[in-house]
Amino acid sequence: MTRHAYCLAVLFLLLPVLLRAAEPVEVLVQGAERLEVGEIVAALEQPQKLMIGPFSFWTGRIGGHRIAVQLTGQALLNCTTSTILGIEEFSPKLIINQGTSGAQAPYLTVHDIIIGRRALDYSGFVTPVRAAGQGSAPLSWTPVPQRLRDPATGKLVTYPDGFAGDPAALAIALRTRNSMGRVFAGVIGSANEVNLELDRVRWSHQVFGMDVEEMESGVVAVVAHAYGIRYIAFRVVSDAPYEGVQFIPQAARATGLFTVRFLENLPPL
Amino acid sequence: MVLSPPKVRLVLFLLLAVLVARAESASGPILFAAATDAELRPLIAKLDGPVTESRAAWQFWLGSIDGKKVVLIRTEGDPLNAVAATTLAIRRYHPQLVVTYGLARAHDPALLPGDVVVSEKFAAFDGMESDVIPLDGGSAPLTWSRLQHKLATAGEKETPTDFFPADAQALGRAKTITLAHGRIIAGVPGSANQVNREADRVAWIHEKWGTSCEDGESAHIAGCAQLLGVPVIGLRVIDGTESTAATVALQFLEAAK
């Protein structure tokens, strides 16, 4: 075998190890679906694609920052798995989770963007005991907040309010233009749920302070906190149950364009 | 096309490399995932050459039990911590099999305390979609629809999925476990970050997803294992004790090759 062939073979054997040590990025930008990452991938300078397991990533530059754009897949299962893989691969300094959401407050309308001053996973609950025939009453369920172990103390810590967005990123986002609607700081709640019962929508606004619901931001907030990585979420209103507006997937374009402008406004990290 | 001898040797070498890589994954450790220290302690106590590692909020115990390489993780009993710890353990240690073990509450009325549900498949029953009901119209949870898990799939695709498969060979092995009290029942462990104590809702979940029992993590661990291409098996003791669950896990390991 020639030396060249040996080198190729050794490279092949080492490929998984080499792939594991990708060049770090400053910002990991996430979207759950193709429409949610399309504008951002299109804005990447010198884009390069790679796969980790079933998840696609595109690296490149926007606004001078080295970026990895990640398709996380929907909801906790996909998103937790892919966020861990993205962090381990790229060691980002800031994570942005962005995409579409359902309004949980009547002041919001389609194409408004909520910047997460706080994000939480609100999917946990304990029901009261009810015998057969006594029905089910979701508005009486007791929320179970997310817990995370503090490695310094070894104790489980409960986060009933979720996790605050990075203050510096929040301030920059509030100065960034949304060409399709308004921009507000607010609370983003995540669960693998689509809630169209307005009493339950009102309940989630009253109990958790949620302005919008979706499936990922609160999940990523937990993981980012566990790693001590700065984090912010942007969510465009794509469905507004108070107005009877059902899901408009194309609204994703608004947060995509907004995220690109945010990255252009973002100073070096 | 005729390959020159060096090219033939290169092709053979690459084939060998692929075979070696496959063999390595088949000889990887068995990953045991449990919710709490109480379920893990009996396994940790049996570790030969124990090593503890951690990453962010999650901890890993490595070693051997009766000459078999194992990794133990604590899932904290909720889907998010469970999926995070499982993802990290799969990435770091390349296990040949994931075993999710612990306690569960029955959904199937035929199950009795002390029975052990071994997974034929898993159902993560957290996904729901409601119909439109106007303000002050209340909530009608027994009319909600099941929302599928859209598993990320290579090529920027989604695969809508109701159930995550269990490994058939591991299931066969699990069925050979003998219990002092209770039965081994092949079934469907379900999980969500929920404690369901409304009998009508439990019956609704059982009907919609075919769940045998519920816990806070098992099906999410199975979904994570499926995303990352690792076989998985579940062992859940109905209304049992943590030490019983650990005993069942150790019996499973003993039955492993």
Image: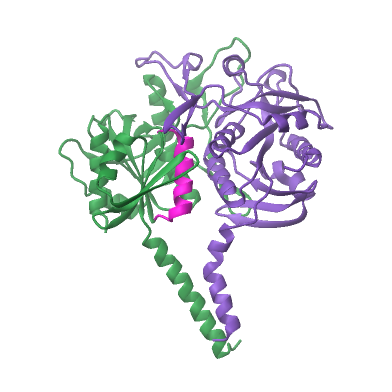
Chain colours: A purple, B green
Q: Position of residue A170 (x, y in %)?
A: 72, 29
Residue B80 lies left or right of residue A34; in this view the side is left
Residue in front for this viewpoint, A244 or B28: B28
Residue in view at x 48 percent, y 75 percent: B15
Q: Does the segment drawn in magenta span residue A14?
A: no
In magenta, the rendered stretch is B77-95
Q: Position of residue A218 (x, y in %)?
A: 58, 31
Assign the N terminus of chain B to one quadrant of the image. bottom right
Residue in view at x 37 percent, y 53 percent: B97
Q: Does the segment drawn in magenta span residue B82?
A: yes
Whether residue A4 is visible, yes or no, is yes
Residue furthest to the top in view is B136
Residue in view at x 37 percent, y 16 percent: A129
Quadrant location of residue A194? top right
Residue B67 lies left or right of residue A232; in this view the side is left
Assign the C terminus of chain B to one quadrant of the image. bottom left
Residue in front for this viewpoint, A57 or B92: B92
Secondary structure mainly formed by the magenta segment: helix
Quadrant location of residue B202? top left
Residue furthest to the front in view is A152
Task: Decide: is A124 above or below B150.
Answer: above
How many badges with numbers are in the image? 0
Residue A224 lies left or right of residue A259; in this view the side is left
Task: Decide: is A62 above or below B207.
Answer: below
